[in-house]
Image (cartoon, helix red, strand yellow):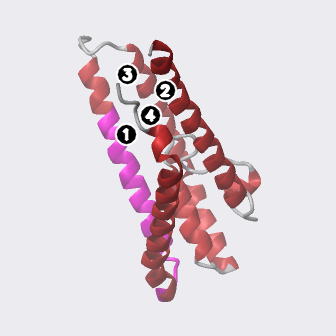
Amino acid sequence: MDKLRKMVPALCLATSLAGLAAYTAVAQTTTGSTTEGPAATGAPGPWHGHGHHGHRGGMFFVLHKLNLTPEQKTQIKAIFAEQKSQYQALRASVKANHQALATTPPTDPNYATLLQTAEKNATTRIELMSQTWTAIYGKLTPQQQQAIPGIVAAAQQAREAREAEWKAQHGSAAAPAAE
């Protein structure tokens, strides 16, 4: 019974890692095929390294699906270039604050200040993303603007279908063993 108790978590972990590896491989082949943007140049995007795949990936995914004109692409690249320094400063602040939070005990007098900084960083990120989308939205045609909700809904449905398929295939392997 002890051997089973040790094997089940290991099996769950292995299954999770295999799923993550497969998902990453699919994501890389999907995003790696684009001919424009940060993925093609190897340059990090505005949210690179933050785990906000839904934001950065979502924004570029939607823009790619809109079939932008060359002029629109140039204008949107200029928007990202203008805001690059703001994103870099935010990234540095988030990283430094995260490291400080990880090493500071909650009983430390500075802990509350670190939490306030984390909240400020989150608010700044939301405001910056809103500014970015507002600027980009102004460069789109009315038809492109109207297409965005449909693109987002279709992507959500596809994501839910992949999740349901994964759960159907792996549901029993991820369930905890009965004692």
- Are the residues at dot 4 and dot 2 in contact (C-beta closer than 8 Å)? no
Q: In the shown orientation, is residue 66 left or right of residue 26?
A: left
Q: Which residue is situated farthest in the bottom direction here?
A: 143
Task: Give the label, 3 or 2, closer to the camera.
Answer: 2
The residue lying at 62 percent from left, 39 percent from top is: 18
Q: Nearer the viewer, residue 150 or 169?
A: 169
Quarter placement of the N terminus: top left
Q: Residues within 10 Å of mark 4 (few under 14, many from 20)?
A: some
Q: Earlier in the sequence, mark 3 or mark 2?
A: 2
In space, the residues marked 1 and 2 are separated at their CA atoms by 39 Å
Q: In the shown orientation, is residue 61 left or right of residue 40?
A: left
> Which stretch appears magenta?
118-142
Pinpoint residue 167: horizontal percent, then vertical percent. Answer: 47, 51
Tag 2: amino acid: Val
Examine the image and state in which quarter residue 34 appears.
bottom right
The numbered mark at residue 94 is: 4
Judging by the rendered image, the residue that carries numbered circle 2 is 8
Element under label 4? helix
Task: Give the label, 1 or 2, closer to the camera.
Answer: 2
Task: Give the label, 1 or 3, closer to the camera.
Answer: 3
Tag 1: amino acid: Asn
The residue lying at 37 percent from left, 52 percent from top is: 126
Judging by the rendered image, the residue that carries numbered circle 1 is 121
Q: Nearer the viewer, residue 120 or 66?
A: 66
- Are the residues at dot 1 and dot 4 in contact (C-beta closer than 8 Å)? yes
Task: Give the label, 4 or 2, closer to the camera.
Answer: 2
Q: Earlier in the sequence, mark 3 or mark 4?
A: 4
Judging by the rendered image, the residue that carries numbered circle 3 is 101
Q: Earlier in the sequence, mark 1 or mark 2?
A: 2
Tag 3: amino acid: Leu
Q: Is residue 136 above or below residue 127?
A: below
Task: Give the label, 3 or 4, closer to the camera.
Answer: 3
